[in-house]
Image (cartoon, grey):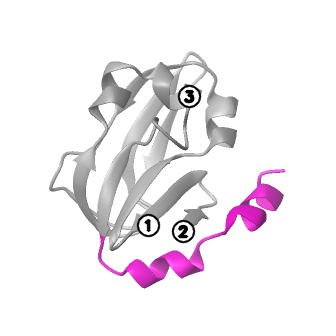
Amino acid sequence: MLRFTDEHEWLRLDGDVATIGITAHAAEQLGDLVFVELPKVGAKLTKGEAAAVVESVKAASDVYAPLSGEVTEVNEAAVSDPASVGADPQGAGWLYRLKLDEPSAMDALMDEAAYAEFAK
């Protein structure tokens, strides 16, 4: 199940753990990424709080926690090669994994069709 937020993050659920990253639309708007800062494994995130930072030659942008939960893994490759996030934002460029407090909360987020309309 792939879901999207109005802050241009995507989530893919596997059990009760969501893989999270920025959307292709966000990556395109930011341009070439030069810096990525991710949360620490074990950090408890609350929906809506800044969880990560992506910085391009144009601007720095916060990546917000789309749902509440605990960080279980981060993508170290994104930190060492920020360009990989822009090159494949919804694949190898994922940012972190979050064990969701309430996996059912994913249902309230946009599906692909709704996000495509939103991002126009």
Task: Please state the extent of the stretch shown in magenta in the rendering.
Answer: 100-120
Asked if marks 3 and 1 touch (Cβ < 8 Å), the reply is no
User: In the image, which is nearer the foreground, mark 3 or mark 2?
Assistant: 2
Secondary structure at numbered mark 1: strand
Disc sitting over residue 91 in the figure: none
Q: Disc 3 or 2, which lies upstream in sequence? A: 2
Q: Is residue 37 left or right of residue 5?
A: left
Give the answer, above or below, for where 21 lies relative to 33: below
Asked if marks 2 and 1 touch (Cβ < 8 Å), the reply is yes
Disc sitting over residue 13 in the figure: 1
Asked if marks 3 and 2 touch (Cβ < 8 Å), the reply is no
User: In the image, which is nearer the foreground, mark 3 or mark 1?
Assistant: 1
Counting from the top left corner in percent of width and height, residue 84 is at 47, 25
- Within the magenta stretch, is there residue 105? yes
Residue at 77% over, 52% down: 119
Q: Residues within 10 Å of mark 2 (few under 14, many from 20)?
A: few
Counting from the top left corner in percent of width and height, residue 68 is at 34, 70
Residue indicated by mark 3: 86
Residue at 15% over, 56% down: 42
Secondary structure at numbered mark 3: helix
Residue indicated by mark 2: 1
Q: Amino acid at mark 1?
A: Leu
Instruction: Determine the image quadrant of residue 90.
Output: top right
Q: Disc 3 or 1, which lies upstream in sequence? A: 1
Q: Amino acid at mark 3?
A: Gly
Q: CA distance from mark 2 to mark 1?
A: 6 Å
Q: Quick one: 15 or 101, which is closer to the camera?
A: 15
Q: Is residue 6 left or right of residue 70?
A: right
Examine the residues drawn in magenta and state their main secondary structure.
helix
Q: Quick one: 16 or 36, which is closer to the camera?
A: 16
